[in-house]
Image: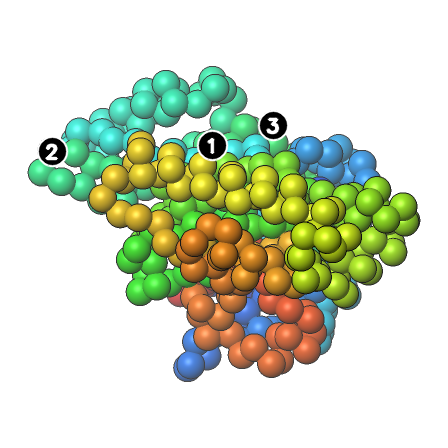
Amino acid sequence: MNLLTYNLLGIKPKSFGLEIEDSYIKVFQLKKNKSGFSMAACNLRPLKKGIIRDGQVVQAEELAKEIRELLKLSRPKPIKTKFVVFSVPETKSFIRTIQIPKMSREEAAEAVKWETEANIPVSLDKVYLDWQIIDSNEKNNNVLVVAVPKEVVDGYYQAVSLSGLITLAVEVDIIATIRSLTSKESNKEPILIADIGADKTSLAICKNQIPYFSSSIPLCGKTFTDALQKGLGIGYEKAEELKGKYGLGKMKKDDMLYNIYNPLIENLAVEIDRSISFYSESINAQEKVERIVLSGGGSLLRELADYLSLRLGKTVIVGNPEMGLGIKQNTAINIAGDLSPFSTPIGLAMRGFDYED
Ligand SMILES: Nc1ncnc2c1ncn2[C@@H]1O[C@H](COP(=O)(O)OP(=O)(O)O)[C@@H](O)[C@H]1O
Ligand SMILES: [Mg+2]
C-alpha cells in the first residue's frame, strides 16, 4: 500500500491529507515555509447517507465522485496534486503497544506478528499490519502496532484510486489527529485526546505523540443533535442550527438545555474517566493524565470544554492544530471557519511531507 517507489524514482510528490468519515470528507493541503506550515487549500463536504456505513465503504463510485468534487471546491484554489495520504477510522482499527525482546529486525517482524495475533480479534492474514519501535530498555523493545482489516482499507483505497488519486500512505485517523494537536515538547506528559466527530468520538491517550490507548464510543456530534430534536420536537436542520448557536447554554438545573444535554455530557465524562483509569491501572501507573484536548466539530459546542473541566477536575481545552505546527490561523480560519474539525486532515497532510523531503 505504501508507494515508496515514487521516491526511488526521485520524484518528491506534493501531497494533501484526506479524512474520510461516514458523514463528511475533508481535505487539507499544507505549504512549508520558514516559520513552519501554512495552509495551501482546504474544504469539507457532507456525504449522503449510505455511501459509507459504519466505517466501511458501500458505494465506491459515489465516494470517488464526492472526492473529485471536493478537490475542485477546495479554497482558495482547487487541489491539483494527485498524491494523497488518507485516513481510516479508529473504530475499525487495532492500535496496540506490545513488548518484545531485543532481536534482529527479521526476528522482530516475526515476534510482532505472533504478539499481535494474540492481541487482536481478527486473524493476521485478514489485516494490514505496520509497526514501529517506540522505546527500549536493556532487554526489551516497546513496539507500536497498527492493524486494519484489509477489507476496510481496500474499500477506501478503491474509491480513492477511482477518483484518480495516488495513495502515498494510509493512516488511522486518531494518529493523524495526535500529530496535528501535539508536539514533542507539549506531549512529554500524557494527554487525553477526544476527537468528537459526527458519527463517533475517538479517545486516545498519547505521550511523546504515541497512542498508548485508543478507543471509540458511539456518543458523538449527532447524538447531541438527536437529543435536541427529540427534546424540543424540532427538525434536524433546526436542531443543528440551535446546537451551533447556543451550545450548552447556562447549564443551570432548571434549564431546558441542561436536561437535554446533561446525560450526554455525563456519559462522555464517565468514558474519559474510564480511559484515564485504564491508562493508570494497565499502562503507566507513574504518570497521571491531567490534560484533555478536545477536537473535531463536536468540540466546538460552546462551553463544553469548561463544563468538562469542572466535572473532571482537569484541564480541558479545545485543541488547536496550531499547537503542533505554525499554521497561520487567520488565512486558514477565513476559509475553514474553524480549524478544530480539520485536525485529522492537517495531521495527514503533515505526514505527506515524509515523502517530499
Ligand atoms: N459550532 C458547533 N457547535 C456544536 N457542534 C458543532 C459545531 N460545528 C460542528 N459541529 C458538529 O460537529 C460534528 C462534525 O464533526 P467533524 O469532526 O467534522 O466530523 P467527522 O470528522 O466525524 O466527519 C457534527 O455533528 C456537527 O454538528
Ligand atoms: Mg473526524
* Dot 2: element: loop
Query: In the image shown, does 333 or 38 lie closer to the viewer?
Result: 333
| Res 111 → quadrant | top left
Which residue in the structure is indicated by mark 1? 94
* Three-letter amino acid code of the residue under disc 1: Phe
* Residue occupying the point 46% across, 50% down: 312
| Res 88 → quadrant | top right
Q: Which one is in front in this view, the residue at disc 3 or the one at disc 2?
A: 2
Mark 3 vs 1, N-terminal side: 1
Mark 2 vs 1, N-terminal side: 1
* Three-letter amino acid code of the residue under disc 3: Glu
**Mark 3 to mark 2: distance in Å?**
36 Å
Q: Which one is in front in this view, the residue at disc 3 or the one at disc 1?
A: 1
Tell me whether circle 3 and circle 1 mark residues in contact (CB < 8 Å): no
- Against 168, residue 129 (above or below) is above
Q: Is residue 21 visible?
A: no
Q: Position of residue 351 (x, y in %)?
A: 46, 57
Q: Which mark is residue 163?
A: none
On the rendered structure, is 74 left or right of 11? right
Q: Which mark is residue 151?
A: 3
Which residue in the structure is indicated by mark 2? 139
Q: Position of residue 42 (x, y in %)?
A: 66, 67
Q: Is residue 263 visible?
A: yes
On the rendered structure, is 90 left or right of 135? right
Q: Quadrant of the C terminus?
A: bottom left
**Mark 3 to mark 1: distance in Å?**
14 Å
**Mark 2 to mark 1: distance in Å?**
26 Å
Q: Position of residue 30 (x, y in %)?
A: 54, 69
Query: In the image shown, does 79 or 111 lie closer to the viewer?
Result: 111
* Dot 3: element: helix
